[in-house]
Image: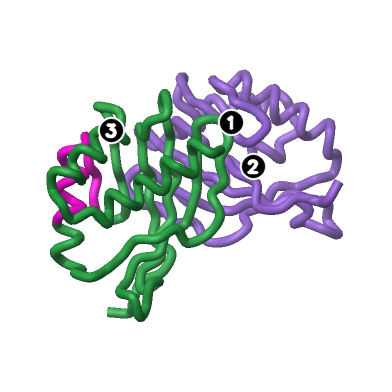
Chain colours: A green, B purple
């Protein structure tokens, strides 16, 4: 469970890392080579695509921080948790949820869903 | 989305089906040959193992019914929903949550978690 806590913390850290080299290094260390990330908006494969998606997300939402939104629940190689994203004065502007599958301690699949978003 | 609603309804129906032949037939039609089912307690592969697990569950909890516990949320090939299980006078004795991955309209993977259970 300690490993899972660390993995989720590093996963969120990658979404917040604005140094491109450090983010790419972190993502490659965190994920298996054939990793996937699928949320309502995107369906990505490999750390490079995930990196590009995070870069776009940071550009679209400057000043937003991703944080853990609740307890981490893990068993076998599957983990679920909620995340918050927003500016300092409204850190839960967006609320999402992920199930992550791991393989040898690295992220192989992310299955993401949205729990809350501002009304457009 | 209509297909997803039907798939989840049939999935819950399989948990409630006590006729062994009909249940096995339903499970085989619902799942891909290499399907998996993993919850906090079991890690299963193939419709036959899932069938055996349901049979054990029905024997352990006679009179329990599995029902949908809330809205179904689906995109790409991934679906999440909550389920309730219990007797008629307490239908949400157990509350669980699944993310299901589909392939060609059939269930390939079930990633299950528990949301609530009676205090032992």
Label pair 2/1, CB-CB below 8 angstroms: yes
Chain letter for mark 2: B
Quickly name the residue at label 3.
Answer: A29
Judging depth in this view, the residue of A106 and B16 nearest the camera is A106
Quickly name the residue at label 1.
Answer: B26
- Are the numbered discs 3 and 1 placed on the same chain, yes or no? no
How many residues crowd mark 2 within 10 Å: few (<14), some (14–19), many (20+)? some
User: Left of B88 or right of it: where is B38?
Assistant: left
A23 falls in the magenta region? no
Number of the front mark, 3 or 1: 3
The mark found on residue B13 in the picture is: 2
Label pair 3/2, CB-CB below 8 angstroms: no
Tell me where the magenta segment starts and ends, as one range.
A42-55
SS label for mark 3: helix
Residue at 53% across, 39% down? A2
A49 falls in the magenta region? yes
User: Left of B72 or right of it: where is A88?
Assistant: left
Chain letter for mark 3: A
Q: In which quarter of the image is the C terminus of chain A?
A: bottom left
Label 3, label 2: how far apart the Cα atoms are: 42 Å
| Whether residue B27 is situated above or below residue B91 in the rendered picture | above
Instruction: From the top left corner, tell me how far across and down residue B119 is, in percent.
Output: 83, 51
Labels 2 and 1: the sequence-earlier one: 2
Label 3, label 1: how far apart the Cα atoms are: 42 Å
User: Left of A35 or right of it: where is A84?
Assistant: right
Residue at 81% across, 51% down? B118
Q: Quadrant of residue A74 in the image?
A: top right
């Amino acid at each position: 469970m300690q490993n899972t806590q660390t993995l989720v913390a590093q996963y969120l850290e990658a979404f917040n890392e604005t140094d491109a080299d450090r983010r790419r290094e972190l993502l490659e260390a965190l994920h298996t080579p054939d990793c996937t990330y699928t949320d309502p908006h995107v369906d990505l494969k490999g750390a490079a695509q995930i990196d590009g998606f995070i870069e776009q997300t940071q550009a679209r939402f400057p000043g937003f921080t991703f944080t853990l939104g609740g307890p981490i629940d893990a068993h076998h190689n599957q983990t679920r948790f909620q995340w918050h994203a927003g500016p300092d004065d409204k850190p839960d502007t967006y609320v999402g949820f992920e199930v992550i599958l791991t393989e040898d301690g690295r992220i192989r699949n992310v299955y993401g869903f949205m729990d809350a978003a501002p009304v457009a």
